[in-house]
Image (tube, rainbow, N blue to C red):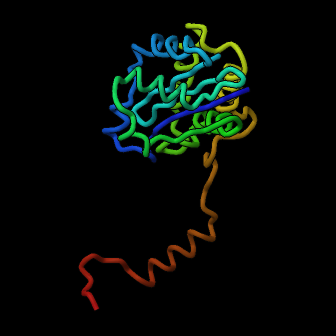
Amino acid sequence: MNLVLVGINHRTAPVEVRERMNIQESRLPVAVSNLVRRDGIAEGLILSTCNRVEVTANAEEGADGEPLLRQFLLDYHHCDLSPWEPYFYWRRQEEVVRHLFRVASSLDSMILGEPQILGQVKRSYAVAREVGALSGVLGEVVNQALGVAGARPRSAPPPFRSLTRPSSWRRKSSAVSRARPCSSSAPAR
């Protein structure tokens, strides 16, 4: 296992940078194919949304994945990456696994728990599988992350469904409201 990930997201880069680094969904199959055709890359996945762009690879043993991903981005975007470097984050090995689980589970989203990211990860995974870019460790990691993120407890009741205020709260709150009437026309002291 030789996992490496480079990315930008809503925490590390402004919208203009994310837009510049974006890989359009219609071009994703070609981009992922180009990634895994590179010497030293065994598997690849690209997740590109409005809030993040991440390129993940399982580099061949002995290969340094970071310069391979940097060169991929340089070739794809046809630009000097040095102005964008401060916005990138890098993950390696177990950090990649942890990150993929957090992203798929929406724990790394702008809005914690938002459901869109799971569908976006699923689409990226499907594209990568269709072009033969996931056939080993990285494919299994993403598959497991999707399984965990999509799991819903079947026996647990929906949260807050039966939550009511105890009657003692109602008695106290009505006593308080009688004692101090609220009025926007009350004079300031």
Nearest to the observer: residue 19 or residue 34: 34
Nearest to the observer: residue 156 or residue 150: 150
Q: Residue at x 52, y 27 (%)?
A: 69
Q: Which residue is drawn at 39% across and 33% down?
A: 50
| Residue 55, horizontal then vertical, whole percent | 52, 27
Above or below, comparing residue 75 to residue 11 in the picture: above
| Residue 70, horizontal then vertical, whole percent | 49, 29
The tally of labels here is 0
Q: Residue at x 39, y 38 (%)?
A: 82
Nearest to the observer: residue 142 or residue 157: 142
Check the picture and name the quadrant holding the C terminus. Answer: bottom left
| Residue 30, horizontal then vertical, whole percent | 45, 10
Q: Which residue is drawn at 46% across and 15% down?
A: 31
| Residue 136 relative to residue 160: left or right | right
> Which quadrant of the view contains residue 172?
bottom right
Q: Residue furthest top?
A: 131
| Residue 65 relative to residue 141: left or right | left
Q: Which residue lies furthest to the bottom in this view?
A: 189
Above or below, comparing residue 22 to residue 184 in the picture: above
| Residue 18, horizontal then vertical, whole percent | 37, 36
Check the picture and name the quadrant holding the N terminus. Answer: top right
